[in-house]
Structures are given as structure tokens and as C-alpha cells.
Image: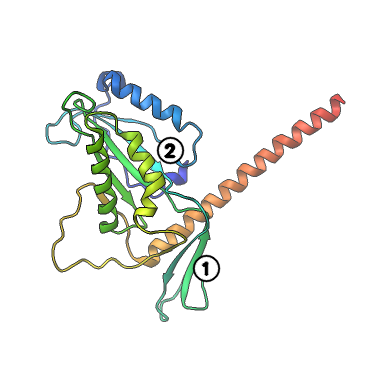
């Protein structure tokens, strides 16, 4: 899943590694194992390797376990990603094939790169009167206000769960509802983010990694190309296995 992490910002540096079982409660371990079972083999929600942090990034300085997910938001279907290019802008050769007659660049894909969700599991998570885990949501193709909107929904989802498990609820909401929430259906137009004059208070967990629209489009184009090549390699490997099986059956026959 190398391209699943392509748009995820670097994980926090691991300080002192501690045994995982000593840092997670039984309830937390059961929740993680349940998620592994539910999403085993999934191409829409990917659970990355857990990172054990001593003195995790929270105000109490408690140990924490960092859990990272890549979530492919759906529903999946043809979606056009485009960006308007000023007429005097020179384009690198790699982008010329995406140029359209209206002065824009566009790519057609079956879905967008993943949202990257980081969650810090603190000792009080899943305890009576405990707080929901700290989280961070990052993305290259969304601006801060859009990520702020998604983070607000995750807050409401965790509030509805009380002191119960929340990770599955978060992941499923991001997977099935986040694009609907942002009114993204069959088209995504990359634009430059303009900082509002008034300082808006945005969610601390919203981390936009978007840069200039053309740079973001180039990164997306690279991701789509890597994904296509990966799919082609997988299909070729499957064909090779099937061909080998047919040869063995013919020799047996």
C-alpha cells in the first residue's frame, strides 16, 4: 500500500519503544483486532503499522499508541480532477497529455487518493468517563475549511458514542459520507486557497497539505500513474499464476 501513504504526512517520530500490550488496555486491543478483522484485505480502509510513543503528544504527557489509517472515500465511480492553468504558464512534459482545449488540465479516475487519519490512543480512552482519542485528519486535495468540516463531524460521531469505541464509526463515516458532506460527486476542481481576512478558528485536527493547485495536480497525476502501474502488475501476476495452473492441468490431463 505504498501509494496509500503517498499523501499522508510524516508520522511523529517514535521516541522510546514500549511493548504494545503494556500501552493498550484490553478493550483497546480488542478494538484494534476487530478493525484488523473487518478491514483485512480491504482496498478502501487500510490500517498501517501501529507506532508506540512514550510521552505521547497530549497535554498530560501520557504514553500513547499512534494508529494510522488510509481511507478511500466513496462512493467510488468516475471522477474528473481538474485545474485551470493560466495561459502563460509553462507545463512540464508529464502534464501535457492531461491538457484540455479549455485551458485546463484534467484526469479521469475511479476514486481519489485516501484521506489520512491519525489517532493517538491514550490510557483513558474506553475507560468510564474517558475522553475520545486525539486525532488528526490530513489530505492534499482538500483545503483547511473542508477538513475542518469533516473533523467537526468526527467530533459529533464520538460524542454520540459516549465512552464507547469510536474508531470504526469514524472510519465508516469517512469512507461512506465524507464526499457527500463536501458535495463532491463526479468532479473535483483544484483551486488556490485564499486565507480569509478574518481569522477563522479551525479544528486543531485539520491538516491540509495542499500547496499550489498545479503542484497538487502534478502530485495527483503521479499518484494515479503509480496506482495504474501497480494494478497492471497485479493483473499480470494473476495472469501468470492462472497460466501456470492451466499448464499443470493440461499436463495432468
Q: Under tag 1, what secondary structure?
A: loop
Q: Quadrant of the C terminus?
A: top right
Label 2 sits on residue: 46
Residue at the right extreme of this rendering? 253
In the image, residue 230 lies at what x, y percent? 56, 46
Q: Is residue 192 left or right of residue 84?
A: left
Q: Is residue 125 left or right of residue 48?
A: left
Up-down relation of residue 91 to residue 172 (above or below): below
**Disc on the earlier residue, 1 or 2:** 2
In the picture, residue 145 is in which quadrant? bottom left
In the image, residue 27 lies at what x, y percent? 29, 21
Residue found 25% across the figure and 68% down from its top: 194
**How many circles with numbers are drawn on the protein?**
2
Dot in front, 1 or 2: 2
Mark 2 and mark 1 in contact (Cβ < 8 Å)? Answer: no
Residue at the front extreme of this rendering? 160
Residue found 31% across the figure and 55% down from its top: 209
Indicate which disc residue 98 carries.
1
Q: Under tag 2, what secondary structure?
A: strand
Q: Residues within 10 Å of mark 1 (few under 14, many from 20)?
A: some
Colour mode of the rendering:
rainbow
Q: Is residue 73 left or right of residue 243?
A: left
Up-down relation of residue 52 to residue 149 (above or below): above
Residue in front for this viewpoint, 15 or 42: 42
Indicate which disc residue 177 carries.
none
Whole-angstrom CA distance, mark 1 to mark 2, is 29 Å
Residue found 41% across the figure and 77% down from its top: 89
In the picture, residue 160 is in which quadrant? top left
In the picture, residue 141 is in which quadrant? bottom left
In the image, residue 6 lies at what x, y percent? 41, 48
Residue in front for this viewpoint, 175 or 95: 175
Amino acid at each position: 500500500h505504498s501509494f496509500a501513504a503517498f499523501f499522508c504526512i510524516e508520522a511523529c517520530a517514535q521516541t522510546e519503544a514500549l511493548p504494545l500490550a503494556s500501552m493498550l488496555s484490553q478493550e483497546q486491543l480488542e478494538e484494534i483486532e476487530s478493525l484488523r478483522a473487518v478491514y483485512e484485505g480491504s482496498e478502501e480502509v487500510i490500517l498501517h503499522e501501529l507506532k508506540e510513543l512514550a510521552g505521547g503528544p497530549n497535554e498530560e504527557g501520557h504514553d500513547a499508541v499512534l494508529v494510522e489509517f488510509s481511507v478511500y472515500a466513496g462512493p467510488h465511480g468516475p471522477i474528473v480532477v481538474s485545474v485551470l492553468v493560466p495561459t502563460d504558464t509553462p507545463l512540464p512534459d508529464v502534464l501535457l497529455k492531461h491538457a484540455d482545449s479549455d485551458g485546463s488540465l484534467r484526469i479521469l479516475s475511479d476514486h481519489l487518493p485516501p484521506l489520512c487519519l491519525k489517532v493517538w490512543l491514550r490510557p483513558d480512552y474506553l475507560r468510564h468517563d474517558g475522553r475520545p482519542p486525539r486525532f488528526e485528519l490530513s489530505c492534499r486535495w482538500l483545503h483547511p475549511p473542508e477538513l475542518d468540516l469533516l473533523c467537526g463531524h468526527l467530533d459529533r460521531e464520538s460524542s454520540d458514542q459516549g465512552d464507547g469505541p469510536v474508531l470504526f464509526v469514524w472510519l465508516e463515516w469517512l469512507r461512506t459520507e465524507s464526499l457527500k458532506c463536501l458535495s463532491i460527486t463526479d468532479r473535483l476542481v483544484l483551486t488556490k486557497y485564499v486565507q480569509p481576512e478574518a481569522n477563522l478558528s479551525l479544528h486543531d485536527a485539520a491538516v491540509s497539505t495542499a500547496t499550489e493547485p498545479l503542484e497538487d495536480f502534478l502530485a495527483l497525476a503521479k499518484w494515479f500513474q503509480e496506482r495504474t502501474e501497480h494494478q497492471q502488475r497485479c493483473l499480470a501476476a494473476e495472469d501468470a499464476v492462472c497460466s501456470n495452473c492451466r499448464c499443470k492441468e493440461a499436463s495432468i490431463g
